[in-house]
Amino acid sequence: MVNLMLRSFLVLALLFGLVFAVGMMALVATGLPIWLAVPFAVIVVALQYLLGPFILQWIYKIRWVEPAQFDPQLAAFIARACQERNIPQPRFGVIDDGNPNAFAFGHYPGNARLVVTRGLLQMLNPQEVQAVVGHEMGHIAHWDFVVMTIAAVVPLVLYTLWIATRVSGRSRKGGGYIALIGFISYIAYVVSQFIVLLLSRVREYYADRFSGEITGNPDALATGLVKIAYGLARAPEAGEAKNDVRMQAARSFGVFDPKVARVLALTGAGTGNLSSAAMEDAMKWDLWNPWAGWYELSSSHPLPAKRIKALEKQSEAMGRISSFSFRAVQPESYWDEFLVDFAVNQLAWIGFVFGLAIAAVGALVFQLPLAGIGAGLLAWGVAWWLQRRFIYPPDLSPEQNVKELVGQVKVSKVRAVPGTLRGRIIGRGVPGLFYSEDLVMQDSTGFVVLDYRQPWRLFEFLFGLLRADKFIGQSGVARGWFRRVPQPVFELRELALDDGKKAVSWVYPLAQFFVYALMALGVLAMMGQVALMFVR
């Protein structure tokens, strides 16, 4: 599951990316001096920094409340942490969504906002909630809003220099020298992006350490991370949540009534004692599968297993006994699966290039252009079909549960586990985002994001805007493919609710249609060549 703060930054990046793109087009079209590109990039980042918090408040359904109205223990913890670390008390908000998450944003610690979801308050125990909130307060205490804004300036300026030099180099003397500067700028831009991501991952470790220090219990954040990152927070057993303080406080505040939990998909405030075996199974993919390291290079967050191991070391340094330590021995190397996955991921392009070669040979060497084109299209289609057969196993009948799926090691974006999940829709993939198309399903073992896809993004947006809310709180069956990207996700083929509502992804059948049409076109072209030969 993609971290909520990461998704927030992606939304802002899209909005201000559009501003930047239009502005650069204007600079190029008007022929303004090249040096204006750099201050323009800085201005765009400054606008994002100044306006970002207000935009986030607008696009997310945040209810601003006093922490004591939800959880007196949490309110006392926040007050104590602020006093001990000399942090201004952040504004506290709740997103009414069953997907557990939390994030902080603002301009500087003095006007910071700290937001949690209803799912976080319900699914984690009080110590875990405080630990997650402590992590977000670490971002506030470390001025991460300012640090990451300054860091973001560097890649954007380098990218701007590359665009500007590429354009001006075509029309000026000394174009070769300018082109060299542009090439170096582009290489530096790519490197700087990875450096910024590394900085982002480092700040997550520091926020984790801050949480461990302020709570005195790093282990609470570790178990909270497992529940959130791997989706192992479970629904409570019957009667388990009756006396939970947070449920009573929320009821009195009027946000929701636990008596209507079934209707609203409020699965309760069960703590869900997490077994060492369950945690160990969940961490295997992060620690063993080569795809994990590949994905982490381009991720703003460290892999959860690495964060948990760092928290374990912090617990030991504090003289505490960690409740978990990864002791499993890797049974085999997973590099063979990784190499197969990597090759399969390129198979359609390999087929395309191979098809072009066949078409060229048929036309230039054998003087049979239609036959060459047909054979090329057929080769491309067959390669594409083989790729899709691997990525999308057709048998979706095996019944699965979240806990077993998360424990799978031989799974990636390319290699999927097909099957069927039964559970309840508890919220959106991005809590509070009014047009988020993805949904979150919870079964008796945990929860997972249902990745809803359509051939055109507009249809996904319309589903999120107009239909997604009607699915929340309902039970049903999801059919599709479980993947790691690196977060656990379940790509939907079809979601069928018990009340008759359905959500169907048309990406799979439409792509299959194009694959078969491509092969059919190739066969027809070869038959046409044969017909021409007989006519002659």
Image (cartoon, grey):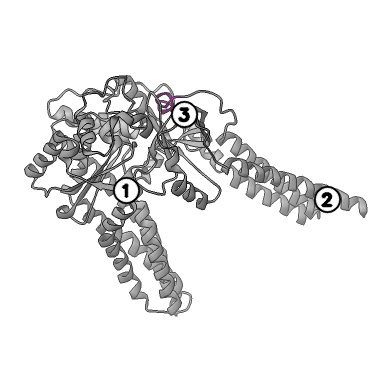
- In the displayed structure, does residue 164 sit left or right of residue 418? left
- Mark 3 secondary-structure assignment: loop
Residue name at image x 20 percent, y 30 percent? 126
Q: Nearer the viewer, mark 1 or mark 3?
A: 1
- In the displayed structure, does residue 62 sit left or right of residue 445? left
Which residue is identified by label 3? 410
Which residue is identified by label 2? 528
- Residue 173 is situated, as x and y percent measured from the top left of the image, at 44, 80
Q: Could you tell me how far apart the alpha carbons at marks 1 and 3 are, in whole angstroms? A: 38 Å
- Residue 435 is situated, as x and y percent measured from the top left of the image, at 41, 49
* Image quarter (top left, top right, bottom left or bottom right) of the N terminus: top left
Q: Tell me which label, 3 or 2, sits earlier in the chain.
A: 3
**Residue 263: image tag:** none
Against 168, residue 46 (above or below) is above
- Mark 1 secondary-structure assignment: loop
**Residue 61: image tag:** 1
> What range is drawn magenta here?
401-409
Residue 28 shows in the view: yes
Foreground residue among 371 and 57: 57
Foreground residue among 192 and 119: 119
Amino acid type, label 3: Lys
Against 185, residue 232 (above or below) is above
- Residue 333 is situated, as x and y percent measured from the top left of the image, at 44, 27
Q: Could you tell me how far apart the alpha carbons at marks 3 and 2 are, in whole angstroms? A: 45 Å
Q: Could you tell me how far apart the alpha carbons at marks 2 and 1 are, in whole angstroms? A: 60 Å
- In the displayed structure, does residue 106 sit left or right of residue 23? left
Amino acid type, label 1: Lys
- Mark 2 secondary-structure assignment: helix
